[in-house]
Image (cartoon, helix red, strand yellow):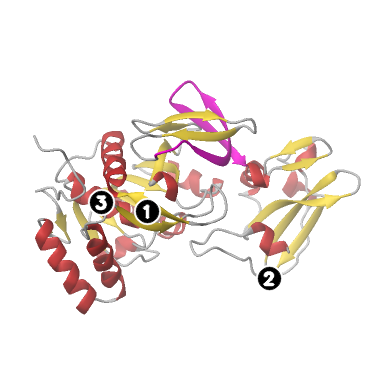
Amino acid sequence: MNKLTYKNVHNRFKLNGVHFNGKELYDKAYVFVKEGDAHEKALGHFILEWFDGKEYIEMTTSGTTGTPKKIHLQKAAMVNSALATGDFFDLKPGDTALHCLPIQYIAGKMMLVRAFILGLELDYVVPDSRPLDITGKNYDFAAMVPLQVEQSLAELDQIQKLIIGGAKLNATLVEQLKTLPVAIYETYGMTETITHIAAKKIQETAFSLLPGIHIATDERGCLVITAPRICEEPLVTNDMVTIIGEKQFIWLGRYDNVINSGGVKLFPEQIEEKLATVIPQRYFVIGKEDDTLGEKLVLVIEGEPYTIAPEVFGELDKFEKPKEILFIPHFKETATGKIKRKETVA
């Protein structure tokens, strides 16, 4: 049997209802680039890049492991990532999948790679906030960002298995999703790991590793990922975790977000989760320099100022209660919609 390479296109692969082999897909990409609308042009450019003879594609990192930078992702590693996803989620040739993510980012690129490596029947649509309205069809597998999930709650039962990434799910949305008859997973990963290396059902606390992934922590308590089939070197993250056995971990928060207040380490993400059902606007907590405490905890809310009743903070521990509340008209964001905490309050 010939070794599977990035040049292989599975004979069960379909794009928007049409079978394509490698050459046909390459030819179709030219048509997309010359005649397609914006999202088809983007798809065409990626397909041409995939089959351009180079062993890698160039991407810009998200900044999860440090300052954003240009990196080369090996196409062979992207194939390995697709195979690991297929194993973990039990995806089979002929399964139907919805692609509703921007193809410019790694998550969007990998949905296409999974489809032609695993033999999925892929519907590629505009990355709209309500993608299921576009097709009205049922799917075995789909990937979305939290905003799409929030806007598509009434239609999510059209999907058998849904993975969610790109940003943390808030507690209110998680509770709504738990009532749905859908296998819904939150994923953990980044550009450097070619999307997810772990996933967890939303009812669970711990992430489970995909095949071929090994983990440890460094002296800071941050996750170190070893995945020789995906990353050439061990990857040191800024995500603080608790490791459970060899195959699971609990995500605690970002090392660079941790607030050291009066000698107590506070994880903003955990505090934010407790506030999710009582503050309707977007918000985050951050540390601010303080002469007495070293850092004091500040709650930052997007929008016009209003009075917050003390009982809003009833679920918080003594040290988790904000010492100051700031109202900011508009939060600053990354291109993918993540809040830039430090820049917002600068």
- Disc 3 vs disc 2: which is toward the camera? 3
Label 3 neighbour load within 10 Å: few <14, some 14-19, many 20+: many
User: Where does the image place residue 179, in percent across and percent down from the top left?
Assistant: 42, 42
The one nearer the camera, 67 or 255, is 67
Residue farthest along the top direction in this orientation: 245
Dot 3 or dot 2: first in sequence order is 3
| Residue holding disc 2 | 329
Q: Which mark is residue 107?
A: 1
Q: Secondary structure at mark 3?
A: helix
Q: Which mark is residue 57?
A: none
Label 1 neighbour load within 10 Å: few <14, some 14-19, many 20+: many
| Residue holding disc 3 | 113
* Residue found 17% across the figure and 73% down from its top: 31
Q: Which residues are magenta?
A: 232-254
- Disc 2 vs disc 1: which is toward the camera? 1
Residue farthest along the right direction in this orientation: 292
Q: Secondary structure at mark 1?
A: helix
Residue 93 vertical placement versus 138 (above, below) = above
Residue 326 vertical placement versus 193 (above, below) = below
User: Where does the image place residue 49, in percent across and percent down from the top left?
Assistant: 26, 62
For badge 2, the amino acid type reads: Pro
Question: Distance of mark 1 from mark 3, alpha carbons?
Answer: 10 Å
Question: Distance of mark 2 from mark 1, alpha carbons?
Answer: 31 Å
The answer to whether residue 154 is visible is: no
Residue 276 vertical placement versus 235 (above, below) = below
The answer to whether residue 246 is visible is: yes
* Residue found 57% across the figure and 64% down from its top: 333
Question: Distance of mark 3 from mark 2, alpha carbons?
Answer: 40 Å
Dot 2 or dot 1: first in sequence order is 1
Residue farthest along the bottom direction in this orientation: 35
> Is 120 left or right of 77, judged from the image as shown?
left
> Is 149 left or right of 306, judged from the image as shown?
left
